[in-house]
Image: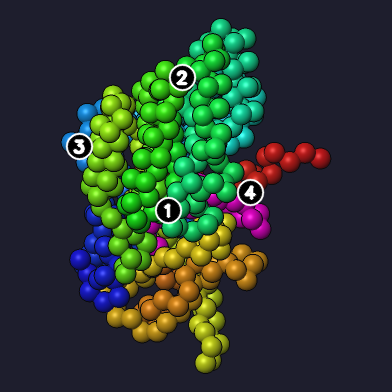
Amino acid sequence: MGTGHSESRLMLFPPTAGVNEKGRLVIAGCDAVALAEEFGTPLYIFDKAALRQKCAEFRTEFGRRYGDVAIVYAGKAFVNRALALLLKEEGLGLDVVSGGELSIARSVDFPMEKIYFHGNNKSAEELDMALEAKVGRIVVDNFLELEMLAEMAGQRGATPDVLLRLTPDVDPHTHKHISTGIVDSKFGIPMASAGEAVARVMSASSLDLIGLQFHLGSQIFELEPYGEAIRVILDLAAEMKSRHGFELRELDVGGGFAVQYTVDVPAPPVSDYAETIVAAVNEKCREHSLGLPKLVIEPGRSIVGRAGVALYEVGVVKEIPGIRCYVSVDGGMADNIRPALYEAQYEAVVANKMNEKTARKVTIAGKFCESGDILIRDIDLPDVVAGDILAVPDCGAYCLAMGSNYNASLKPAIVLVNNGRARLIRRRETYEDLLRCDML
């Protein structure tokens, strides 16, 4: 560990992070400043060991408490071909929400039986892709999809396994933009219509209803909402068994497990989520004399969040006496829109000055033509000058996945680091890439 401004913030970086004899940030044995010099900035770094460690932690903590568990990575947090291969090696499943994500999975021969296809407005083309690929589960989100899928499966002579996504009307107390389990949500079937949905799927000869699914939202720090939602869903399962003979074979409780983004807001450990979820399932199944279903969880952010680090080069430092000091970097809302979108908070370190003490409070601004393009507001850093390298931890989830070409900017390169070696897993875009789809 280092001294200076970096000491407490290093806990937010991957476990392999440290400070070398030059006073520079090191991740998985790789000097961050040297990486910036070799690959350019903005640069996103993923720590391979950290990714594997989180996969193993979820398998262990849930597996030691419950007999039949599937860990299904939520690809919306971030997925590309290299990451899909790593997840495949780790034995995880993959939750996809588009034909594009499914195409990434197919390109690396990801086991289709481990694919869960989500989405609130799947197109006919995407449903056809799912049926053609024989994905493991299609998570039906609404009645129109139910009708479309039943007809398309019938035409193919297929009988896909489906889950029904329900909204249990449980408030997870997170930001409104990432809360999805309340009744006022674009996702899922409200509980008032859940019984009808179960009956309609069960009456469709071309569909096999094997389970129920819910997802409360993202960045959920409280544990009790999981228990509350599980109780609601299992009460319904018991009622549907009594009325329609429905057998719950799978219960998918979604994800939403929180990640610590700032030093003063810790997140619960995976073990706490596992303990709460498993206890609630066991209790309710025992109460209703239900057989224990296969338990499915869908972590995304909590697997890749801490494993990812963003590097930026400092440019203009603008001092407004008595008001604010803006430190502009060569990235911003095009590669990380989260602060602008829902006021996400981050920490940062100066990667080439890890042992230097804090000297002043600054605001980290992006380079894009929006006043709201602020990455970090009011953070204490050493004296920062043009050419310094700023490192932002916890950037593995939703930064790259929601990235854009705003201002016709180029999407950044991504490297995977492990044991002192760095491997490029996405090259930086070129201006030719920007123009490739345009037609005159």
- Given residues 180 and 413, the one toward you in this image is 180
| Badge 1 or badge 3: first in the primary sequence | 3
- Given residues 178 and 27, the one toward you in this image is 178
Q: Which mark is residue 431?
A: 4
Q: Which mark is residue 244?
A: 2
Above or below for 176 versus 366: above
Label 4 and label 2: CA atoms lie apart by: 59 Å
10 Å crowding of disc 2: few (<14), some (14-19), many (20+): some
- Residue placed under numbered mark 3 in the picture: 65
Tell me which amino acid carries mark 3. Answer: Arg
On screen, residue 397 versus residue 59, left or right, reads right
10 Å crowding of disc 1: few (<14), some (14-19), many (20+): many
Label 1 and label 2: CA atoms lie apart by: 31 Å
| Badge 1 or badge 2: first in the primary sequence | 1
On screen, residue 400 versus residue 11, left or right, reads right
Tell me which amino acid carries mark 2. Answer: His
Tell me which amino acid carries mark 4. Answer: Tyr
Report if the CB atoms under discs 1 and 3 are less than 8 Å apart: no
